[in-house]
Amino acid sequence: MTEMGNAIVIQVAGTQIQSLSSLNVSGVDLEILEGMRDAGELFSFPSMDQLWFALRLRKNMTLSAKEMSEGESTFRGFSAATCNPEYWYLTPAGGFLQKPNVYPTSGISDIFTNSSLYAFECATACVINMYHAMSKSMEQTTFNTAFQNIYLYSWNTDPELRLYTFHANFYLPGDVVYFNNPDYDRSNANYRGENAVAMGGGKFFGHGFGIVTAEEMIEALNKKRFPNSNRSAYLTSLVTRFSPEVHSGLYRDHRVPPVTIHHNKISISFYQYIRYLYKGR
């Protein structure tokens, strides 16, 4: 994306889309496009297929978050994490490592199908939703080829997800935002903050909180501050999303294993995870 002032710029194959009505979309798809239009930045897609894929991926991100919200998985830190041993190894650090005889699509889907067997914190929840949304947005064989040996731990992700994080004064449905709680009660690090999926319509999904407004999220986090705190929780400007290069034809010719940092810090942002990652190298 490139700064374009307040210009209305959504491009497909180098041609600017003049009117969103020409795309004949509604609901969350329209909200996504309106957000792109009003962002004052360039959103460029090589083809209409890739624009539709971007919309489908974002919509599926919100649907995955909704499904997780309606499930029975619980919020727990790494030391108390649980998973279905039929599909995943539970590592000593509290991560979930895909078993070698399990298809990636099956392992991710099981977290939603047998949700009562799973417990994890909010960064891991967002990554699970990203994998699930991606698996629903492309052919299963493509997903299983691209995302092998998945390891779920905090913000650890396969490079093929191509996530990036940045500061912005806007977000779109399907983005992950971060609520910071600077005065969280140090006896319970679960509430240092919350990674949340922007659902559209002013709502957010935060694992352990459900689907709520920003005001409701802040109110809930404020109840978990240390006594006599005078600093409120707040929605930060951090936004994490899929890179524009992610598309339905992605595949892997060779495997570059991701670097994992077992930081044992619950509820951190992707930005903080990257800082740990580079510090640990």
Image (cartoon, grey):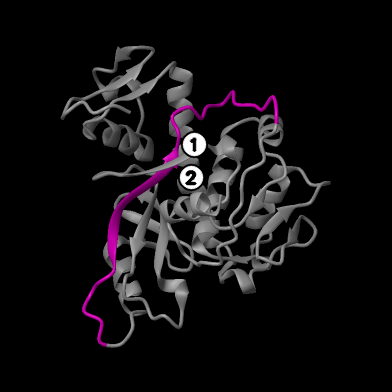
Quick one: which residue is furthest to the left in this view? 6
- Residue 218: quarter of image: bottom left
In screen coordinates, is 267 left or right of 35? Answer: right
From what the image shows, is residue 30 above or below residue 91? above
In screen coordinates, is 137 left or right of 52? Answer: right
Secondary-structure class at tag 2: helix
From what the image shows, is residue 258 above or below residue 233? above
Residue 250 colored in magenta in the image: yes
In screen coordinates, is 210 left or right of 281? Answer: left
Q: Which mark is residue 61?
A: 2
Residue that appears at 58% across and 44% down: 131
Q: Which residues are magenta?
A: 228-254
Residue that appears at 42% across and 24% down: 51
> Circle 1 sits on which residue?
57
Secondary-structure class at tag 1: helix
Q: Closest to the observer: 25 or 218? A: 218
Asked if marks 2 and 1 touch (Cβ < 8 Å), the reply is yes
Q: Which mark is residue 188?
A: none
- Kind of residue at badge 2: Met
Q: Closest to the observer: 66 or 274? A: 274
**Magenta portion: prevailing SS class:** loop
Residue that appears at 66% across and 65% down: 93
Give the image location of residue 84, x and y in percent: 74, 62
- Residue 180: quarter of image: bottom left
Residue that appears at 38% across and 35% down: 29
- Kind of residue at badge 1: Leu
Image quarter where the N terminus lies is top left
Q: Residues within 10 Å of mark 2 (few under 14, many from 20)?
A: many
